[in-house]
Every structure is written in structure tokens, then in C-alpha cells.
Amino acid sequence: MPALSMPLALPPLNLPVAFGAPHLALVYRANLTSSQVLLVLGAAGGVGLAAVQIGKICGAVVIAVARGDEKVQLLKSLGVDHVVDLMNQYVTASIKEFLKSRNLKGVDVLYDPVGGNLAKETRKLLNWGAQILVIGFASGEIPVIPANIILVKNWIVHGFYWGSYRIHQPAVLEDSVRELISWMEKGLITVHISHTYSLSKANLAFSAIKDGKAIGKVMIVFDDLGTVRSKL
Ligand SMILES: NC(=O)c1ccc[n+]([C@@H]2O[C@H](COP(=O)([O-])OP(=O)(O)OC[C@H]3O[C@@H](n4cnc5c(N)ncnc54)[C@H](OP(=O)(O)O)[C@@H]3O)[C@@H](O)[C@H]2O)c1
């Protein structure tokens, strides 16, 4: 099915799923401002694509890392300041060149839902006093950040788990969702859905994610409720 971008066509049930974590992480934890440089890894993925949109709303300089031309073009269309295509560019060299062209020293906030080697490489780009948002491990590899480097560089490392706000700070979670709904109503943010499948084809939805074809979110629709039978 073709890509679908729908600010209001769906009830905003999918909104917290797509935007909840990046909003709380960037706005409440990192206090992202317009004077900062934000680097988003896995930027065309579910929580990455939301993070770049939030970064732009906050007025930050946004750098995005993704793989493949289709993802790069979408990120550029969202106004991302610099996009690195990992398929044909060296990530640190490309970002260093961009920072130099803008007379910027380095990255202030690293938003990392990927981990692995990419996280290790991009840490070389961080400024003194930078913040690292540990969001997830899509690469399958959990990064190790040496404490001596954190000390010397005065970095702040945020462990971030959105779901736990429901238990520990439900009021913050509610405020966050309220702000996201208002942004969505104003057309400032869009939940991008690259693939839509019926429930009976749910396996294809997982394949799209596993094969790196998904951009933003993949949606499973319950369009055949009459034929759905519980196996419980
Ligand atoms: N902390 C929280 O509260 C929270 C909330 C939601 C999700 N998460 C976590 O965040 C992670 C991402 O979730 P998601 O929904 O965005 O997943 P997703 O839609 O699959 O996106 C992940 C992205 O990571 C990139 N990627 C995967 N392996 C990579 C590798 N080896 N090197 C470089 N890039 C790689 C892929 O982009 P390219 O192919 O373009 O590189 C993909 O688009 C997951 O671990 C998830 O559990 C955490």
C-alpha cells in the first residue's frame, strides 16, 4: 500500500505511540532549545522520524542519520538541516563537514534509538556538556559509554523509558500528550505510516520493519473484524 501521512484522518490513538517517547525525552529531559544542535540516529524509524519533527519545532539545528535515498528524501522534505545516508557516506566525516560549514562546534544532544557502532562513532561529535538520550537498541547492540569520558567531557547521559512515566510521573505524561495533540491539531506534526496491512497479513508488517523498508510507523488495520476469531 502507498505511504500515508495523516495528521487528523485517524483519531490520535497512534500519536503517543509515535511521538510520546521523543517528546518527553527531547522537551522534558533534554530541554532542547533553538541554540542547540540535535543529532537523531535511526531518523527514519518510528521514534526517529518523530524526533526530527520535534527538533524542528524546538528550533534546533537537526542532523539526521538514515539508510537509503527514499528515507533521506523524506527527511529533507521535513526541513532537516543535514541528512547522512549511511549507505554511501561516512557519518562522522559528513557531519563534521556540515558543522564546519555552519560554524558550529559539535552536537549538543544525541538522540539514540540505535546503539551499536553508530552510537560509538557519533559520540566523537559531541560537545563538552552534551546530553545523550539513550532511547533504544535497534541495532541489537547495547552501547557502553566509558565513565571516564563522561567525566572529562561533562556529558549528561539520560536513561529514558517512556512507559515508566505512567507509573512515576503520570501528570508529566498527560501534559506531554496534551501538547502533542495541540501540535497535531495545528498541523505541526505528522505520524508517517509507510505500510498498512490487514490483521491477516500482520507477518508482512513485521517483515517490513525487519527488512528496513518501514519509514516511520507500520500500521495493522482491523478491517475484517467479522472474520477475526479469538484463539484464547
Ligand atoms: N525508551 C523508550 O521509551 C522507547 C520508546 C519507543 C521505542 N523505543 C526503542 O527505540 C528503538 C527504535 O524504535 P523504532 O520504533 O523507531 O524502531 P524502527 O521503526 O525499527 O526504527 C529503527 C531505525 O533504526 C535504524 N537501524 C536499525 N539498525 C541499525 C544499525 N545497525 N545501524 C544503523 N541504523 C540502524 C533503522 O534505520 P535505517 O535503516 O534508516 O538505518 C530503523 O529505521 C527500539 O529499540 C525501541 O524498543 C524506546
Image (cartoon, rainbow, N blue to C red):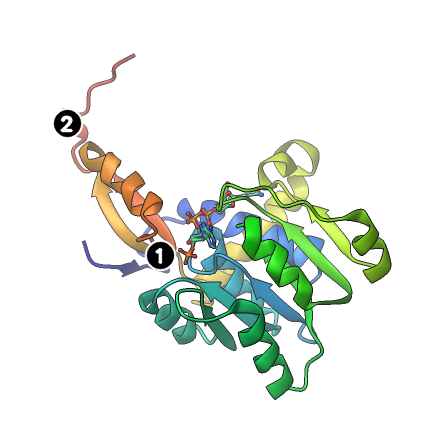
Q: Where is residue 154 in the image (x, y as percent from the top left)?
A: 83, 59
38 relative to 96, above or below: above
Q: Position of residue 130 (x, y in %)?
A: 74, 63
Q: Residue shown at 35%/56% (left/top)?
A: 215
Query: Residue 95: in sight, yes or no?
Result: yes
Query: Residue 222: in sight, yes or no?
Result: no
Q: Residue shown at 51%/67% (left/top)?
A: 64
The reply to whether discs 1 and 2 touch (Cβ–Cβ < 8 Å) is no
Nearest the camera: 32 or 72?
72
Report the disc number at residue 75.
Answer: none
> Residue extending furthest top?
232
Q: Mark 1 and ligand 1: say if the CB distance to the nearest ligand atom is below 8 Å.
A: yes
Secondary structure of the residue carrying numbered label 1? loop
Q: Residue shown at 49%/64% (left/top)?
A: 65
Q: In this view, does 138 lie to the left or right of 125?
A: left
Badge nearest the viewer, 1 or 2: 1
The residue that mark 2 highlights is 226
Q: Residues within 10 Å of mark 2 (few under 14, many from 20)?
A: few
Q: Is residue 171 left or right of residue 219?
A: right
Q: Residue shown at 47%/67% (left/top)?
A: 188
Instruction: Indicate the quadrant where residue 136 lies.
Output: top right
Q: Which amino acid does label 1 sit on?
A: Ile
Instruction: Indicate the quadrant where residue 198 lies.
Output: top left
Q: Position of residue 83 (x, y in %)?
A: 47, 72
The residue that mark 1 highlights is 215
Secondary structure of the residue carrying numbered label 2? helix
Q: Which amino acid does label 2 sit on?
A: Gly
Nearest the camera: 3 or 208?
208
